[in-house]
Amino acid sequence: MVKINLHRGISGTVKTVTVQRDSCGRWHAIFSAEGEPGMITVHPGPAVGLDVGLEKFAALSDGSVIENPRYLRKTEKRLKHAHRALSRKQKASRNRKKARLKVARLHAKIRSQRRDFLHKASRRLVNTYSMVAVEDLAVRNMVKNHHLAKSISDAGWSEFLTMLCYKAEEAGSRVVKVNPSGTSQECSRCGTTVAKDLSVRLHKCPHCGLVVDRDVNAARNILARAIAV
């Protein structure tokens, strides 16, 4: 008997199905279905600016934040032990196969946790806001920085932005991408440039007196640029 767990219900007519086996030995069936387009809805919610980060996963222009779960970082110690155990096993042995499977399962768990978090976070945003303004980030270039690559990959920015875009279309919301240059340095109240490095987490404007979290300040600038488009 084969037990099937559907990630979600299938609507429309199934056209193709692809069966895959992952590194943990689990089988997955991917269905492609064709259906009638739904009615276009107009989202009644407000607009928001969103600034993704590493300390916080994202800061919103309304002052709220989405905490960074850091799934890879939290499991790093267990992964190191598992990799060390794998390296000590004799090649082509049964014990090495078991150790390799343990490592694969840990990586699969991290991927599943991250994807679940990204799905829920993106869904909440498009269901709440009529427009989500984000920076047009070149994530592929950013991960070339070896000091930040692991943290950026752990956060899953690229996958999150992809989810945000297609979920927004379903929800009647929209995603607007803006130029990211200077969003953290510019004061969101008066427009003055306030230079600060990454270690400075608070925006303090000497001109208008605004004191606010630097990521919230950036999110407000992102929203202002999107509205001006």
Image: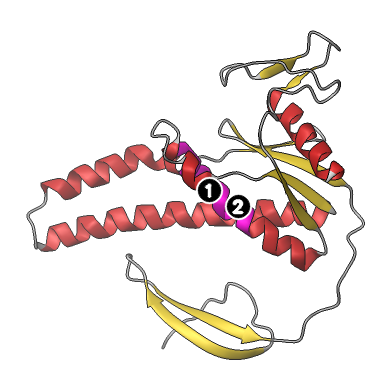
Q: Amino acid at mark 1?
A: Gly
For this orientation, the residue located farthest to the top is 206
State whether the magenta stretch is mostly helix, strand or loop. helix
Q: Quadrant of residue 42?
A: bottom right
Q: Nearer the viewer, residue 162 or 70?
A: 162
Q: Is residue 137 toward the left or the right of residue 103 in the image?
A: right
Give me the residue at 53% from left, 48% from top.
Answer: 156
Location of residue 22 with respect to 110 vertically, above or below:
below
**In this picture, is 75 found above or below 199?**
below
At x 45%, y 33%, the residue is 148
The spot of residue 102 in percent (x, y) is: 28, 55
Q: Is residue 84 above or below residue 99?
A: above
- Rendered residue at 20%/42% (across/down): 84
Type of the residue with mark 2: Phe
Say if mark 2 contacts mark 1, CB within 8 Å: yes
Q: Within the image, what quadrant is residue 223 found in?
A: top right
Q: Which mark is residue 156?
A: 1
**Pointer 1 local density, CA inside 10 Å: few below 14, some 14–19, many at least 20:** some
For mark 2, does the 10 Å Cα neighbourhood hold few (<14), some (14 to 19), or many (20 or more) residues? Answer: some
Q: Percent x, y for residue 120? A: 66, 55
Q: Which residue is mark 2?
A: 160
Q: Which residues are magenta?
A: 151-162
Q: Is 139 or 115 nearer to us in this picture? A: 139
Q: How many angstroms separate mark 2 from mark 1 (CA)?
A: 6 Å
Q: Position of residue 69 (x, y in %)?
A: 55, 41
